[in-house]
Image (cartoon, helix red, strand yellow):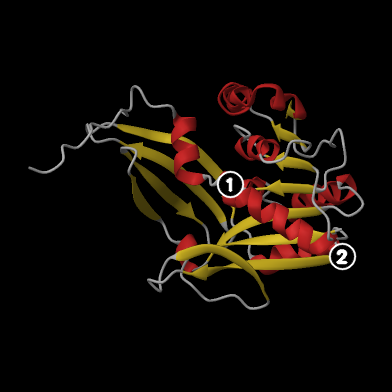
Amino acid sequence: MGKKRTPSPYTARTADKYELYQISVQSPEPDIAFLRRVYKQARARPAHHFREDFCGTALLTSEWIRGCKSCTAEGFDIDPEPLGWGRKHNLGPLGNASSRATLHEADVREPSQQPPDVRCAQNFSYWIFTQRSELLDYFHGVRADLAEEGLFVLDIHGGPECMEELEEETEHEEGFSYIWDQSEFSPVTHATKCYIHFRFPDGTEMKNAFRYNWRLWSLPELRDVLTDAGFDRIDVYWEGTAEDGESGNGIYRKTRLGENDTSWVSYIVALK
């Protein structure tokens, strides 16, 4: 007889959308490892103080202080709900170490308490700035806020597929499906409206668990705006290809050209 499958613990009524988001979207250990690596390569010393913009549940903030006994961190977000969730579920289990992290319910354009060595904006969160003047103002503030040898890291999604109106479903072994819904896209303004839904084995669905009204910024646009904001060097790190020849392998290396894939995610590293 085959092994009996364990019933999924998740339903639309019982699931926690922040837990599902962290499982589906975030990868804190490799993300923090990448940030530490690029800083050490650029500055020949370890980074100490970290800032996470649009931090939500502060998962990266928590991972930063978890991995270093003397490191400190700050997280900024205007929404009190995910911040409260993160304090309880991500920082709380760290015990006394959590005192080395400060979460601010504040606009990401506000200055840090301490100049960060590394500051990041992940999951395309900065796309909320839809006007170039807004984005330039944000980048100006980031550069001024960084420590003397600080660096700023963004992730970016691109390729022709990201301009299509589509739904993409990913099944997770934990017992639910993640749905990325690119609902609307304007080729004139690059305004895009996206949603995250979750579906469960019992047939229920958590519709519109997360909503995004963004501008889809291109890599050349972002490099130009970062240059105008005064950053001295801007590097792009591209993901390698796995053995199947199709999916990414999770290893990001510096590139000048990239590959013309239908869909890709890369990092931009801007050095002060």
Q: Residue furthest left?
A: 1
- Name the spot of residue 191 as percent of width and height, x first: 57, 53
Q: Is residue 93 left or right of residue 195?
A: right
Amino acid type assigned to the residue bearing label 2 in the image: Asp
- Name the spot of residue 112 as percent of width and height, x first: 84, 36
Question: How many callouts does the rendering have?
Answer: 2
Q: Residue furthest right?
A: 148
> Which residue has dot 1 on it?
29
The residue positioned 76% from the left and 42% from the top of the image is 50
Question: Circle 2 sits in a helix, a strand or a loop, which is it?
Answer: loop
Task: Give whichever of discs 2 and 1 has the lower sequence position.
Answer: 1
Which label number is shown at residue 193? Answer: none
- Name the spot of residue 1 as percent of width and height, x first: 7, 42
Q: Nearer the viewer, mark 2 or mark 1?
A: 1
Q: Is residue 251 left or right of residue 224?
A: left
Q: In this rendering, does residue 105 appear at all?
A: no
Question: Circle 1 sits in a helix, a strand or a loop, which is it?
Answer: helix
The residue positioned 85% from the left and 46% from the top of the image is 141
User: Label 2 vs label 1: CA separation?
Assistant: 28 Å
Sort mark 1 into few (<14), some (14-19) or many (20+) by Cα contacts within 10 Å: few
> Which residue has dot 2 on it?
232
Of 125 and 103, which appears nearest the observer?
103
Task: Classify residue 202 by image quadrant.
Answer: top left
Amino acid type assigned to the residue bearing label 1 in the image: Glu
Q: In this rendering, does residue 134 appear at all?
A: yes
The residue positioned 70% from the left and 65% from the top of the image is 221
The residue positioned 37% from the left and 71% from the top of the image is 244
Quarter placement of the C terminus:
bottom right
Of 46 and 175, which appears nearest the observer?
46
